[in-house]
Amino acid sequence: MSLQELRYVEPSPTGWGSSFDWNEEQSSTTVGSRGGVRIATIREMPGMGWQARVEMRLSKLTRLRQGWDGYDAAPPNISVTAFAMSVLHSVMKPETPAPSIVPTHGGGVQLEWHSGGLDIELMIYRPFEAELSVEFSDGQEPIEDERLTTSFDSLGEVLEKLA
Amino acid sequence: MRLSFPDQASAPGDPLPEYAAPPVVETSVGIQLDGLHGYNSLAVAAYRSEIISEFPLLEELAPLDPAYETFGPGDSRLAQPQIQLIAGAVQPRFCFIAANGSELVQIQRDRLFYNWRKTQKGEAYPRYLHVRQRLQSQLGRLSDWAKKERIGEPVPTQCEVIYVNRIPLSDADGNSCGLSFIFPWLKGLKGMTEDGSFQFRRRLQNEAGEPVARLNFNLRYGTDEAGGREALLQLHVRGRPSDSTLSGCLQMIDAEREVIVRTFTEVTSEDAHKLWERKQ
């Protein structure tokens, strides 16, 4: 949070892909930059990589209303969705399939991959509080509720099989 | 609490280098936090009223996005462009600034930082202990304020230290010198470049060998406003504290600052250390 123009936030958006449409009149998911200065929409397009798909989904989830589950569930907190993106950047390859993402009652998110004979679930309760479960169709010993905080090497290893 | 690189050169207990006249022009120390679910701008007004005598000036800036240091096999891939997610009302980052401009407190829903910066009057760097004490005081205030305003309980998730050094590219006699006079590892660079930048990240691990933090190194150089050559070296460490207590955060910040001081010394030359009056 230095005030000298150099600021270490995440990698800056230097090269927007062709799937981004800066016309906010058009439909799909609206996202934008800090301060709400720049607003963009993203349209789902064939060949779109995991990153854009995940960002669309997370952006939608943060807009859920309070009580989205018919009870009193809160929408996922932006700190949870930002942490989820950070984790994915640590483990995903460009060709890794995007996970399905579902909100949880407690304001967290669950990331799921079900393909290649693998059932992978990463539950993120809040930043640095996550649990990994993996089931293998080949009879390999499953991973059950492995607690993960800063290092996501074990998730990266199983995702390697999907890339 | 000790942070180290997997290939750390220094050993535990090695004395920390010290400089009488370091080229630091700004330091920023603070935390990212979670848990202030009821945060709102009116509550911040109450925070401000407690420190307004020390920090009478106000600035509003765009909020910074949450940023976390996580680790996995994909970390070293080239950065992908990212889109920032917007959720709910965008609340500003408030800067409460001392009358002379040299100290400020920055607060937003998920961050609290204390900054010292050199102003045109050229105050000497007040040293780390002063900066640490100022942050400690604000962190204590944050908890009390959150409780009083009933906006939640702050839970620190990341601790950060940033040092910005402005380094004139000149020798002890004031004659201009090349970059490699200050940064000897750049010796292979042939010819004079107009400007440039160099950056890298390194993992840092705790005593148990777990990756918990990252050093971000950023060196830029070019011509300053007066036409002289200078380099701007920013060293930034961000990581997860071992626990969410005030003392846990301060221990992490101490460890991060130690990494910065050692890195600064390792990447700069002995000739430069003489300019900055290295004491040990």
Image: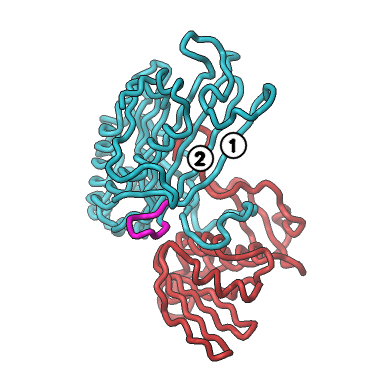
Residue B27 image offset from top left, x and y in percent: 39, 33
Chain that appears cyan: B
| Residue named by callout 1 | B198
Tell me where the magenta segment starts and ends, as one range. Answer: B204-211
Q: Name the subunit of mark 2.
A: B
Q: Is residue A150 at all visible to an observer of this figure?
A: yes
Q: What is the quadrant of the C terminus of chain A in the image?
A: bottom right
Residue A85 as seen in the image, left or right of residue B33: right
Q: Is residue B209 magenta?
A: yes
Q: Relative to B275, is B102 above or below? A: below
Give the quadrant of the N terminus of chain A: top left
Q: Tell me which chain appears red.
A: A
Q: Are marks 2 and 1 on the same chain?
A: yes
Residue A77 % position (x, y) = 45, 64
- Going from N to C along the chain, the mark reached first, 2 or 1, is 1
Question: Cα distance, mark 2 to mark 1?
Answer: 8 Å
Residue drawn at point x = 28 percent, y = 51 percent = B1
* Circle 2/circle 1 CB separation < 8 Å: yes
Residue at numbered disc 2: B217
Q: Is residue B183 magenta?
A: no
Q: Which quarter of the picture shows residue A54? A: bottom right
Compared to residue B209, the image places residue B159 above or below, namely above
x and y percentages locating residue A11 in the rendered image: 59, 49
